[in-house]
Image (tube, grey):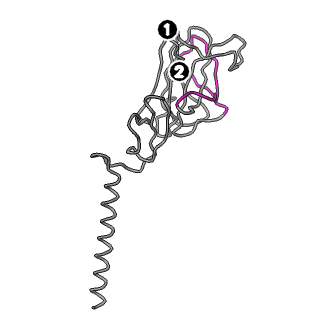
Amino acid sequence: MSKKIKFVGIVIVIFLVGWGGYVLGVQQLNKGDEVCVQKDTQARNLETGETRRFSTPCDIPDGWEEIGAEVLSSGAVKEGYAIYVQNQPAGEGVFISRFSLDKYGWIAIHEDRNGVPENILGAARFSPDVHQGEVGLLRGTEDEGVYYAMIHADNGDKVFDLKNDTPVVHKDGEVIMARFIADDDAPDPRK
């Protein structure tokens, strides 16, 4: 057999093996009619509120919903209080687009831990006549992190203390807060 025929045969075998691997790979990434791309995807359990990252959207199990940059903002309005926060680039401060307080109060930024607000990264005190502002942080937010802007009562001493300046809870039992995502691709709400 000539070297030319042998070379062509090897090229054909390599092509067929490569094409077969590609077809098998695409079939494994298909979920129904959807082709899944390798993309870090965050999802929330609809029953428990837990958040978790998955390597593709197809890895998200039933009973979960994808969350991410398409969730542009979050807010809460309850008798005398309101808070609205947009997704924004990660940084050393969080811009609160709109809020309403019926008396002096604090807005604290909590980081998410398994779908619930946990550690406070920073807090700022606001008067009832101010309706937007920035909360400086002791530790900055991180890209793709989930956070909460929560209204806390002010005990009057002008110093934030988690034990004394507790979250404002509406009479229906809900804490007044807004959830947002630090997303470096999101527009900066300060501009």
Neighbours of disc 2 within 10 Å: few (<14), some (14-19), many (20+): many
Q: Residue at x 48, y 18 (%)?
A: 76
Q: Residue at x 54, y 37 (%)?
A: 145
Q: Residue at x 62, y 11 (%)?
A: 104
Query: Label 2, on which residue?
Result: 177
Q: Amino acid at mark 2?
A: Met
Q: Secondary structure at mark 1?
A: loop
Image x and y of residue 6, in percent: 30, 85
First to last magenta residue range:
115-138
Q: Viewer-proximal residue, 157 or 63? A: 63
Q: Main secondary structure of the magenta part?
A: strand
- Whether residue 191 can be seen here: no
**Numbered marks: total:** 2
Query: Label 1, on which residue?
Result: 79
Q: Residue at x 49, y 12 (%)?
A: 78
Asked if the residues shown at circle 2 and circle 1 are in contact, with their CB atoms under 8 angstroms apart, the answer is no
Q: Is residue 143 above or below residue 76?
A: below
